[in-house]
């Protein structure tokens, strides 16, 4: 789901595993040649599956008022990854993006690969829905225009990614790494503080953008400064998560909903970064996997479209929820599977020659 320009998506980040000469993994960066890494796409594929899993209960509850204890239990599995799965997308974006580009090409790349797909897919669907309701053209224009001005394309992730990329573009031009980290940490604190004040409207999810800048910046620092990542950091996430859970504290997270107090900021940062290292290490172990790679390459389309397909499919089966454990589990797994398949079909269509402009590929 890390949307970048073609140049940003083509990169070389060789990861050397444990060996006689390299006892820990080392990121080696080269811009002389360009190569797409399989494990990055695998990681994004795993992450987007977590996203689709986590939104099932949300769509059931918000769109159709479905409250099922079995769904709640299945949804609670999300606790295993909720602290890192969204920050991981921003970390990977920082790892894969070229923030040394001049501003205009960099800004244009964000418009093409983020805003255009979001606007076309989200508002194209809304337009069809509003027309089916028989709404007037004036009402439709006002509604979509207001939505764009306040929320960009409806979901927090898109404007947050767009804004945070611009902020990091500016930060990388500061000479000292410690100054960049300090500023991004202050932005995280300010974002958490502002989020608690609902009287401040979150136009274009700017509060979220402030909170995620640090993850994108850390991803970029790992790449540019050739940071050696100790192997233990790839797997320490699970012990840390267990410590947080058994301490009786809520697991902090930054998603559409932010559950982070001021004193939890160090915790959410550590969990998010170590969780990201873990998912990247797991992806390297998985190796080449065409299915996960396809999901990863098309994670933006899946993110944008899975809400639409959930609404459509849940409307067909809303009456089937009857309290049966078996039925709830079958619907849960079945709808998630059908949703992902539908998103993949849409992604395949949008990558065809005359449709690629929707994805900003022009």
Image (cartoon, helix red, strand yellow):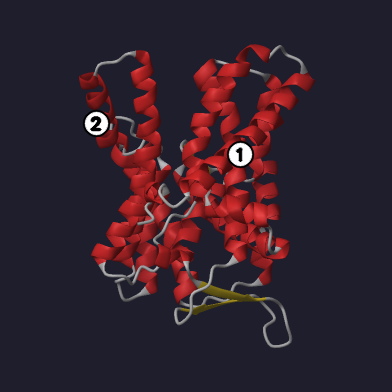
Residue 263's place in the image compared with 170, above or below, is: above
| Disc 1 and disc 2 in contact, CB within 8 angstroms | no
Between marks 1 and 2 in the image, the one whose residue lies nearer the viewer: 1
198 and 139: which is toward the camera? 139
Place of residue 88 in the rendered image (x, y in percent of width and height, measured from the top left): 53, 54
Quadrant showing the C terminus: bottom left
Q: Residue at x 50, y 53 (%)?
A: 89
171 and 295: which is toward the camera? 295
| Real-space CA distance between mark 1 and mark 2, rounded to the nearest whole angstrom | 30 Å
The answer to which quarter of the image holds residue 76 is top right
Whether residue 9 sits left or right of residue 250 in the image: it is: left
SS at circle 2: helix
- Residue 191 seen from this side: no
Number of numbered discs overlaid on the protein picture: 2
Residue 269's place in the image compared with 260, above or below, is: below
The answer to which quarter of the image holds residue 65 is top right
Residue 340: mark in rendering: 1
Q: Residue at x 35, y 20 (%)?
A: 130
280 and 359: which is toward the camera? 359
Residue 274: mark in rendering: none
Place of residue 2 in the rendered image (x, y in percent of width and height, measured from the top left): 47, 55
Residue 329's place in the image compared with 291, above or below, is: above
Residue named by callout 2: 145
Q: Residues within 10 Å of mark 1 (few under 14, many from 20)?
A: many
């Amino acid at each position: 789901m890390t949307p970048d320009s073609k140049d940003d998506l083509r990169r070389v980040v060789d990861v050397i595993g444990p060996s006689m000469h390299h006892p820990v993994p080392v990121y080696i960066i080269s811009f002389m040649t360009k190569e797409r890494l399989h494990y990055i796409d695998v990681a994004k594929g795993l992450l987007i599956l977590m996203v689709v899993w986590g939104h099932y209960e949300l769509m059931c509850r918000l769109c159709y008022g479905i409250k099922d204890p079995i769904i709640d239990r299945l949804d609670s599995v999300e606790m295993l990854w909720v602290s890192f799965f969204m920050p991981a997308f921003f970390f990977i974006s920082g790892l894969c993006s070229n923030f040394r580009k001049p501003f205009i090409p960099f800004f244009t790349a964000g418009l093409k690969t983020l805003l255009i797909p979001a606007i076309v897919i989200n508002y194209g669907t809304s337009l069809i829905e509003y027309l089916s309701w028989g709404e007037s053209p004036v009402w439709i224009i006002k509604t979509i225009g207001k939505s764009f001005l306040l929320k960009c394309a409806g979901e927090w992730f898109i404007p947050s990614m767009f804004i945070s990329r611009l902020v990091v573009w500016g930060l990388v031009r500061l000479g000292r790494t410690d100054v960049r980290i300090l500023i991004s940490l202050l932005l995280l604190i300010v974002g958490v503080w502002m989020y608690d004040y609902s009287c401040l409207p979150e136009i274009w999810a700017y509060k979220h953008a402030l909170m995620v800048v640090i993850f994108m910046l850390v991803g970029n620092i790992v790449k540019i400064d050739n940071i050696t990542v100790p192997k233990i950091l790839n797997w320490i996430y699970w012990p840390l998560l267990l410590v947080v859970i058994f301490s009786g504290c809520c697991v902090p997270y930054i998603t559409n909903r932010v559950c982070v107090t001021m004193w939890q900021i160090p915790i959410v940062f550590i969990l998010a970064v170590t969780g990201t290292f873990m998912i990247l290490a797991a992806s390297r172990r998985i190796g080449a996997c065409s299915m996960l790679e396809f999901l990863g390459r098309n994670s933006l389309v899946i993110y944008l479209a899975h809400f639409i397909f959930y609404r459509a499919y849940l409307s067909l089966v809303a009456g089937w929820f009857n309290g049966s454990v078996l039925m709830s589990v079958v619907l849960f797994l079945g709808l998630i599977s059908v949703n992902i398949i539908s998103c993949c079909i849409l992604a395949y269509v949008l990558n065809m020659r005359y449709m690629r402009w929707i994805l900003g590929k022009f």
